[in-house]
Image (cartoon, rainbow, N blue to C red):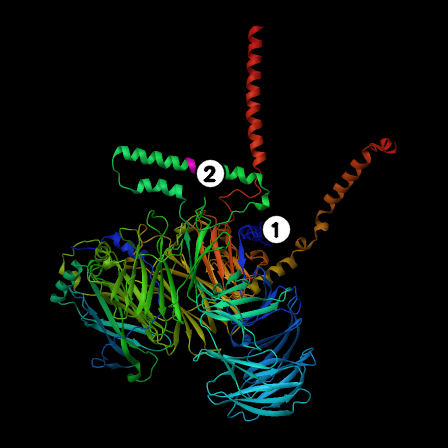
Amino acid sequence: MARLPAFNVAVVSTVLLIVWTDFVCCNNGRRVGDNLETEFSGFSVPLEHSFEVDDVARFRVRGSLVLKAGREPSVSLSQNQLSEEDRTKLKEVAAVDGLYRIRVPRVFLQADRQTERQMEGYLTAFVRACAMVESHLSDVISLHTDVSGYLIGVSIVTFPGACRGTEVEDEVDLEVFNTTLSIMAPVNAPGPETALFLERMEQESEKKGKNPQEQKSFFAKYWYLILGGAIFLMVSNSAQPPAGGGREQS
Amino acid sequence: MAKLILLWLKCVIFWATIEAVFEDQVGKFDWRQQYVGKVRFSHFDTHVQSSKKVLVATERNVFAALNTRTGELFWRHVDKSGSEGNIDALLQHGQDAVLMVGNGRLLRSWEISVGGLNWEVVLDSGSFQSACLVGQQDMVKHVAVLKKTAISVHYLSNGHQKWIENLPETETVDYQAVYSDGNGEVYVLGVVPHSHIAIVVYSLEDGEIIKQMSVEAPWLSNIQASCVVVGQGMLTCVDSAAMSFYMLDLRLQLQMTQVPLQAYSVNLFSAETGRRLLDTTLIDFYSVFQLYVQAFLKKDDSVGYRAMVQTEDHTLTFIQQPGRVMWTREEALSDVVTMEMVDLPLTGTQAELEGEFGKKADGLMSMVMKRLSSQLILLQAWIAHLWKLFYDARKPRSQVKNDITIENLSRDEFNLQKMMVMVTASGKLFGIDSKTGGILWRHYLDNVPPNAAFKLMVQRTTAHFPHPPQCTLLIKDKDTGLATLHVFNPIFGKKSHVTPPALPQPVLQSLMLPLMDQDYAKVLLLIDDHYKVSAFPSTKNVLQQLQEMAASIFFYLVDSSQGRLSGYRLRTDLSTEQIWEVVIPPEVQRIVSVKGKRPNEHVHSQGRVMGDRSVLYKYLNPNLLAVVTESTDLHQERSFIGILLIDGVTGRIIHEAVQRKARGPVHVVHSENWVVYEYWSTKSRRNEFSVIELYEGMELYNSTVFSSLDRPHAPQVLQQSYIFPSSISTMEATLTEKGITSRHLLIGLPSGGILSLPKMFLDPRRPEIVSEQSREENLIPYAPELLIRTEWFINYNQTVSRVRGIYTAPSGLESTCLVVAYGLDIYQTRVYPSKQFDVLKDDYDYMLISSVLFALFFATMISKRLAEVKLLNRAWR
C-alpha cells in the first residue's frame, strides 16, 4: 500500500508553478466519429475512462454524453455498469495510488451540422483512483463551455474527495456510477453598478429634502450655543480689570 | 441617519488611508534614479566656453542635457514611446537644438539652457534621411531636411519652410546626407552602392540646382553608416574592410585620399592633414558602440579633448584628458526586465558566531577555544565600532559619510536594506543597494541573444551560512527556445563555481521546488520539449528526493498559440505524463496572461469575521491560476475578456467569467483569495477594475492542509466592478513578512505616479445598502467610482517615467513592504499599508519619556526617605 501521505500533498500545494508560455507539441488523438449517434435536437459523444496499474492511459468507453445545444445547453449521461474485471482493476489501481482519468472529445455545441461539431483532440481530467473507490463511484463531472459554445474543459471530483485508506469490501458498491453531471457556460462578470448607486443617491437627497431639520445650517441649529458662548466671553472680558495699564505708561 | 452614515464613512476613509510622506521624510526612505537610455545622438554644447552641457538623444525617445562634470541630468524630455516619438536627428546651433521626431514628421527646436520648447512644425510625411544646419556668411539661419525624394529648408528662428525641391534621379541614387559649408550652398550626397557618390548642390536662396557631380567610391554602400563631413566640406569615410579612411574635399577634389588606421584605440586625426594628434588606448572596456569627441584648444595652444563613449553594455563613460574617467552612467538600467531582492549577509562577526554552530563538534577543548576566539573577535569589533563613533563625533556632521561598499555590506536590524539584483535587456546584471541606490556590482553577459527572455530565481538565500547565496538566471532565446543558465552570487555578482548543466533542448518550463539539496540550494526543474525533466543541482541526494516526491510534483504548460493548457505529473524516472488538458479555441479567444500566486506569500487570516460573528473562510488554493483571455473579435460590441480560474494541479475550472464589451490590455494581480484585473470598457469608454474573491463558505473543508486533489466543493465566487479614472501601466500587490498587514495595490500610472490603493476599496462584499452588520464589519458602502486621492501617491513628486513593472518584497518589519518601480527610471521606497504599527515614530519623544521615568524614580526614592524619617520621628515621640 504505497499511499501518499497527506504531508506530500501539502507540499505539492506549496509548489507554485510558473508559466513559460510556450509551444507544446500537440499529441492529437484520433478522430472519433464511429460511435456517434445523432438524436433529435441533441447529439451524443463518448465519455471515456482509463485506469491502469502502469499508469499508461488506455481509454475505454464509460458511457455516452447527450448534449443539447441551445441558449441553455443541457447534458445527460447514460453509462454502463463497471464489470467484474474492471472493479478488481480499479481496486488494484487504487492500491498503487494510480489515477482514474476521463476524457471527452472537443466539440462545438452551437454548430448546425454534425461534421462541424467534432474537433480534433480531447479534453482530459483525472482523479485519484482511491478517491473513486472510497467514494463508491460517486463523482461530479462538469463540462465547461466558452462564450461561443466550444467545450473547453472537463473536470471530475469525487464526493467525499479524500483517500483515507478505508477498505471497500462490498463489490456492489463499485458497480454503478453515481454521477452528478452539469454543463457550465461562463457567467457574465458584472460591470460597475452605476444605476443603482444613482438611485440610492437620489433617494437620499429626497429624504433630506423631506426632512427640514436636516437642512438647517450650522448657525441655524446652534445659534443659542454660539450666542451664549459669545456673551460669556464678553462678560468675562469686561469683568477683568485693565491689568498692568498703569505700569505700561511708566 | 444619512448624516450618521456619512460621518461614519468619513471616519472609515480617514482611518483607512495611508498618510502621505511628511516634508522632512522626503528622500529619507526613498530614492529615484533617472536614465535616458542608449544614446543615439550627442552634441557637446560648445557655444559658451564654460558650458558644462552635453546633449543626448536616445533610442528610448528621450532628449536630455547631461552635466559633463558629474554626469547628472540638467533636464530631460521623454517623448512618446515607439516610432511616433523616435528621434531621427539632432542638430545644435548656439542656444538652439533642432530635433527631428517620428520619421521626419515633426521638427522641433529646443532652448538648451533650460530645455524649453522654442517651436514645433509638422512636416509632410516621407521617409526621413538626414538634416543639417545651413549657414550663410557665418550666420546660421536655416535648417535643411533631406527626405527620400525631396529636400526642404526651414528658418531656424520659427521653423517656417523656405523652399522645398524634389531630388533628381531618385530611382538610381540613394540620397542619404545633406551638408552646407556656410556660403549659401546646400550639398546633397547620394550614393549608388558600390559605384559612386552623387553630389547635388543647391542654392540656398531659391533652391535651384547649381551643379551636379559624381565621385568614384566602389567600396562604399552606405554614407550614413560610414561617412561624416568634417571641417570645411571635408567628407570623411571609413572603410572597415580595408582598415582605412578616405577624405574628400567636397568643393575641390574629385578623388578621395586614403589614410590607414590602427586598431582598438581612440585616435584623433587632423582633418586637414591626416596627422595623428593623440591617441589613448582604451582598456577594460567592452567593445565600443559609439564615441563622441570634443576637441578644443587649451590656453597654451595644445589640443585638449573630451570624449563620451557608449559601450556595448549601454554604459556611457565620459573621459577627459589625460584619459581620466570623469563619470559613468549605467544606461542599461533604463531597461530593467526582471529583478529580485536578496537579503544581505550577516556581518563578519555575526557570521563567525553562526559558523560555530554550523560546524561539527570536535572535542570540548577546541569548542571552548573557538568560543573564546569568537568572543574576542566580537570584542575587537565592538571596540573598533566605538573608536569609529568617537572619531566621527569630532568631525562636522556633513563630512561623516557612511559609504556602503561591498566589504561593509551587512543586514540591518529590521532587514530593511537588501540587495536588488536587476537584469536588464542588454544582458547586464546589476547589484544595487536598496538603501542608497548605489551600484555595488555589475556583470555583463556578452552572449545574450537580442530577443532573450529572462527569469531570475533565488536558489539559496543568505540564511545558510557558510554556503554562499546563489541566484540562477535562465536566459532563453525566444525564437529557438534554447536556454542557458547563469549561476552567480547575488551579493558580490561573481559567477558561481557551480557549473550549470548544458541545456541542448529547448526549455518549455522551469520551476523552483521547495526541496533542497544537502547544501540548502533549492531544486530547479527544467522541462524540455520532449517533456523530459532535468534538475539543477542534480546530485544523488536531489534525485533521490525527487523520486520520493515525484507523485506529488505537478506542473503545467501553456501553449497560447493553440490555446492549450495542460497539466503534467512527474514520474519517478524523471519523465512526465500528461494528466489534464483544457483547450480554449484560439479562433475565439487567445490567452494573454496566466498568473499564479507568489510562492513567498503568507496569508495570516484564514477567514473574515462577519458582522454576526460568524467566519467566512477564504478559499486559499496555492495552485490556483488566473488565466486571462482576450477575444479575437475586436468589434466594440462583441469584444470581451475572459477570466478563468484553473487549479494548476487538477486542471479543474474553478470559475469562468466573461467581461463583455471589454478590451485589453488587461492587468492582473492574483493573491490570497482574490484576483483583481483592469480592462478597458468599450461600451462606456473608460477603464474599469474588477475584483473576484473566492470563499469556501461558513465552514472549512479541511482546515489543517490544503490539497487540490481533495477539495470537492467549488468555492463561492463574489465579484464587483468599479470605474477607475485613469489608464494604468502596471499593477502589483504589497507583500509583507507574515501577511498580517492589510494589502494595498500598487498601481503605476502613465502619468508617472505610483498609487497605493487600499484593497479595502476593491472588495466584492462592499454593500449596496448599509446595514448594521456591514458596519460592524467595517465595509465601505459601494460606490461605483474609485477615486484617486493625491495622498495615495507614494512617490509624491518623484515621477517615474514609463513605469514597466513594480516589484514588492517583504522586510523584517511586518508593517513595512519594500517597493521598487522600474521603467525608464528606478524608484525605491517603503510603504506601510497599515501604518507603522510596530515602529516608534521618527519624532518620538525619548527625552520626555526618559525624564518622566527618572523623575518618578527619584520621587519614589525621596518620598521613601521622607517616609522613613517621618516614621522614625513618630517612633521617638
Please tell me which residue lies in front, B496 or B653: B496
Q: Which residue is mark 1?
A: B23
Label 2 and label 1 in one chain: yes
Left or right of residue B171: residue B297: right
Q: Amino acid at mark 2?
A: Ala
Horizontal and vertical percent for residue B383? Answer: 46, 36
- Label 1: state its secondary structure: helix
Residue at 19 percent of width and 55 percent of height: A3
Q: Is residue B666 above or below residue B827?
A: below
Using a 10 Å C-alpha cutoff, classify the residue at mark 2 as few (fewer than 14 neighbours), some (14 to 19) or many (20 or more): few
Residue at the right extreme of this rendering: A249
Residue at the left extreme of this rendering: A85
Q: Chain of mark 1?
A: B
Query: Image quarter for residue B620?
Result: bottom left
Is residue B744 shown to the viewer in this render? no
Horizontal and vertical percent for residue A137? Answer: 21, 62
Q: From mark 2 to mark 1, how far is it between C-alphas?
A: 36 Å
Is residue B705 shown to the viewer in this render? yes
Q: Which residue is mark 2?
A: B384
- Judged by depth in the image, the label closer to the viewer, 2 or 1, is 2
Residue A225: say if magenta: no
Horizontal and vertical percent for residue B828? Answer: 50, 56
Q: Is residue B603 above or below residue A237?
A: below
Residue range of the region highlighted in magenta in the rendering: B379-385
Residue at 46 percent of width and 85 percent of height: B219
Query: Image quarter for residue A27?
Result: bottom left
Q: First in sequence: mark 2 or mark 1?
A: 1
Left or right of residue B492: residue B708: left
